[in-house]
Image (tube, helix red, strand yellow):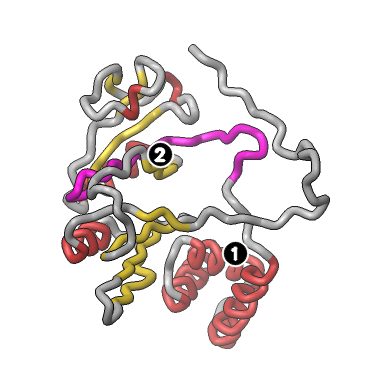
């Protein structure tokens, strides 16, 4: 079996500026035939609807974000000339592929059984060739999958990641975004504090910020903060 190697990501590039500009990969465009049908499907997945903007010239953009994701998907009309269903191998990283599959099945989504590749790259084969049923032995990180497709056939991969290679963690919040979240948390915590049991603010803030990163509204995040504090007492 091939060995995964972590390559250095901080080596200087000849001629590059010493100050790098962050480039965050945040949106993937997927081609669909029927915008309303796709909107209904991605709502059914439980993903957050960020935008649905129609314009007079027929252009329309719809954006959804999976729970906890820093990257979103867009589809609509007059967005791409790619054939509907041609987007394949779209990764959704999960900590427990079995639990993720169970959640999707409960939502009425047709998901494959959990499998691991018997031959390199078999997770991408549409016919399912080369796959071995069940998770990878000892749930080896990066090696357990399940797949599903949207109504057009765009293909999604659930990949279980339990331990990441060094330096391969998800992107961090920038200072401006974190500042905004802290100010928002301060406001909602201030509304909770007068009637709250004795607690340290840090626990409430942590639960609030994690909930907001998971796509919950400020009101839902405030409830999570309250549950975290009162459930721990």
Query: Do tag 1 and tag 2 residues touch (Cβ < 8 Å)?
Result: no
User: Left or right of 22: which side holds 25?
Assistant: left
Give the residue at x 24% y 48%. 83
State the residue in front, 232 or 28: 28
Give the residue at x 36% y 62%. 64
The answer to whether residue 176 shows anywhere in this view is yes
| Mark 1 crowd level (few <14, some 14–19, many ≥20, 10 Å Cα) | some
Residue 159's image quarter? top left
Secondary structure mostly taken by the magenta-highlighted segment of the chain = loop
The mark nearer the N terminus, 1 or 2, is 2
Q: Position of residue 227 (x, y in %)?
A: 47, 68
Give the residue at x 67% y 29%. 7
Q: Position of residue 61 (x, y in %)?
A: 33, 68
The residue that label 2 is drawn on is: 96
Q: Which residues are magenta?
A: 150-169
Q: Is residue 120 above or below residue 79?
A: above
User: Left or right of 64: which side holds 33?
Assistant: left
């Amino acid at each position: 079996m091939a060995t995964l190697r972590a390559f250095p990501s901080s080596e200087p590039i000849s001629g590059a500026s010493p100050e790098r500009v962050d480039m965050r990969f945040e949106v993937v465009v997927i081609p669909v035939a029927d915008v309303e049908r796709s909107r209904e499907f991605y709502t059914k997945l439980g993903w957050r609807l960020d935008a649905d903007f129609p314009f007079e010239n027929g252009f329309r953009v719809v954006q959804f974000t999976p729970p906890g994701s820093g990257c979103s998907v867009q589809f609509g009309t007059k967005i791409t000339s790619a054939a509907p269903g041609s987007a394949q191998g779209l990764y959704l990283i999960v900590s427990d592929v079995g639990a993720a599959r169970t959640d999707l099945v409960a939502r009425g989504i047709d998901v494959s059984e959990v499998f691991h590749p018997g031959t390199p790259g078999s997770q991408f084969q549409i016919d399912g060739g080369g796959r071995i049923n069940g998770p990878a032995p000892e749930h080896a990180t990066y090696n357990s999958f399940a797949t599903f497709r949207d109504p057009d056939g765009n293909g999604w991969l659930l990949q279980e990641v339990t331990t990441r290679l060094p330096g391969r963690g998800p992107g961090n919040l920038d200072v401006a975004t974190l500042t905004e979240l802290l100010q928002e948390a301060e406001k909602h915590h201030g509304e909770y504090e007068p009637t709250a049991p004795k607690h340290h603010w840090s626990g409430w803030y942590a639960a609030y910020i994690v909930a907001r990163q998971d796509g919950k509204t400020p009101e839902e995040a405030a409830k999570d903060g309250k549950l975290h504090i009162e459930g721990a007492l």
